[in-house]
């Protein structure tokens, strides 16, 4: 499994699938897909799809990358190299050899502004005289309108001021009163060196924490059956469960998962190399399994 294989094809750069197929079918350790499928708990059709580059068979990109990493490790390949090639094939990242021509935006000259309208002073003076003449002729109307406006403003202030209520004095806050905070959960004393932490934002409050002893696919679903986490975890990886008792888990290799509840390690949820689905992640339900000695 750890034997490193070198794949060299002069003048031709192989795809990720070709690398996997050649690693499996050549060299001293030729192996059957069915054997590897049972070992990794991955369906044969998915492994075949990876070798043939038929990625539509696998439902999501995260599964494609997770299965490919596990497959590469099992075949003794560099998983990072395989994943990098695979991401390029899936279009998740750009190939460094490819260059994309950027469209040049042509800056068009700003259209000339229209010349300001010139006002004839004689016309302006004539208009002012006409306006003042109209006001003088109908000054009674203007005076009545202005008086009505002032009266309306006064009435509004009187009505608003009369309906104003006095606010009750605020109750003084006791300076000694403190807001209760959620207790901080102690970090588990993991049995294996931590490789990578997932959802570490939940580390201070997570009651359930997972750590993988061996590679295993881990999927967490909420009460509606929607996936909140799905990934192939490698040895030492840690996952902090969100708060709540409605989550369920699926483990590709249930015997490879350490489950910690409130900082205590519980017994294994199943035998090694066994897939198990629909496991309740409620802290009380997990505690009922019993704690490891």
Image (spheres, rainbow, N blue to C red):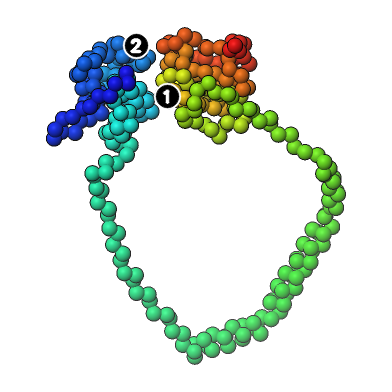
Q: Looking at the rendered structure, which numbered label has been put on residue 223?
A: none
Q: Residue furthest left?
A: 11
Quadrant where the image shows the N terminus: top left
Task: Tell me the element at label 1.
Answer: loop
Determine the residue positioned at 69% across, 76% down. Answer: 141
Residue at figure coordinates x 49%, y 90% from the top left: 122
Pick out the residue farthest to the top. Answer: 271
Residue 225 in sight here: no
Residue 171: percent from the left, percent from the top? Answer: 85, 45
Q: First in sequence, mark 2 or 1: give its number.
A: 2
Instruction: Give the alpha-carbon distance from disc 2 to disc 1, as whole Å.
Output: 18 Å
The answer to which image quadrant residue 274 occupies is top left
Front position among marks 2 and 1: 1
- Asked whether the viewer can see residue 177, the reply is yes
Residue 110 location (% of width, % of height): 34, 70
Which residue lies most toward the bottom here?
Answer: 122
Q: Residues within 10 Å of mark 2 (few under 14, many from 20)?
A: few
Between 278 and 97, the one lying in front of the other is: 97
Measured from the top left, where is residue 49 in percent x and y? 27, 21
Q: Is residue 24 above or below residue 81?
A: above
Instruction: Please tell me how many numbered marks the rendered image carries.
Output: 2
| Residue that numbered label 1 is attached to | 234
Give percent across and percent down for residue 125.
Answer: 54, 89
Q: Name the residue under label 2.
A: 38
Viewer-nearest residue: 189 or 181: 189
Mark 2 in CB contact with mark 1 (< 8 angstroms): no
Instruction: Name the foreground residue: 113 vs 87.
Output: 87
Quadrant where the image shows the C terminus: top right
């Amino acid at each position: 499994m750890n034997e490193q294989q070198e794949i060299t094809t002069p003048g031709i750069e192989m795809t990720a699938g070709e690398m996997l197929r050649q690693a499996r079918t050549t060299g001293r350790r030729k192996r059957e897909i069915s054997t590897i499928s049972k070992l990794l708990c991955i369906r044969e059709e998915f492994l075949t799809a990876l070798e043939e580059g038929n990625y539509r068979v696998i439902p999501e990109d995260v599964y494609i990358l997770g299965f490919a990493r596990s497959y590469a490790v099992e075949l003794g390949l560099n998983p990072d190299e395989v994943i990098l090639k695979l991401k390029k094939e899936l279009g998740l990242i750009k190939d460094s050899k490819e260059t994309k021509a950027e469209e040049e935006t042509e800056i068009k000259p700003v259209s000339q502004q229209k010349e300001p309208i010139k006002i004839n002073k004689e016309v302006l003076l004539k208009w002012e005289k006409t306006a003042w003449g109209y006001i003088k002729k109908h000054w009674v109307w203007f005076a009545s309108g202005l008086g009505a406006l002032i009266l309306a403003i006064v009435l509004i202030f009187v009505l608003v001021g009369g309906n104003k209520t006095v606010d009750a004095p605020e109750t003084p806050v006791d300076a000694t009163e403190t807001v209760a905070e959620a207790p901080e959960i102690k970090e588990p004393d993991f049995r294996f060196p931590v490789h990578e932490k997932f959802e570490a934002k939940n580390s201070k409050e997570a009651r359930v924490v997972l750590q993988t002893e061996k590679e295993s696919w881990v999927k967490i679903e909420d009460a509606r059956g929607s996936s909140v986490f799905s990934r192939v975890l490698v040895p030492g990886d840690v996952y902090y469960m969100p708060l709540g008792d409605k989550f369920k888990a699926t483990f590709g290799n249930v015997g490879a998962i350490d489950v910690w509840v409130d900082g205590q390690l519980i017994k294994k949820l199943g035998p090694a190399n066994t897939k198990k689905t629909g496991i309740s992640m409620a802290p009380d339900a997990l505690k009922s399994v019993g704690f490891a000695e």
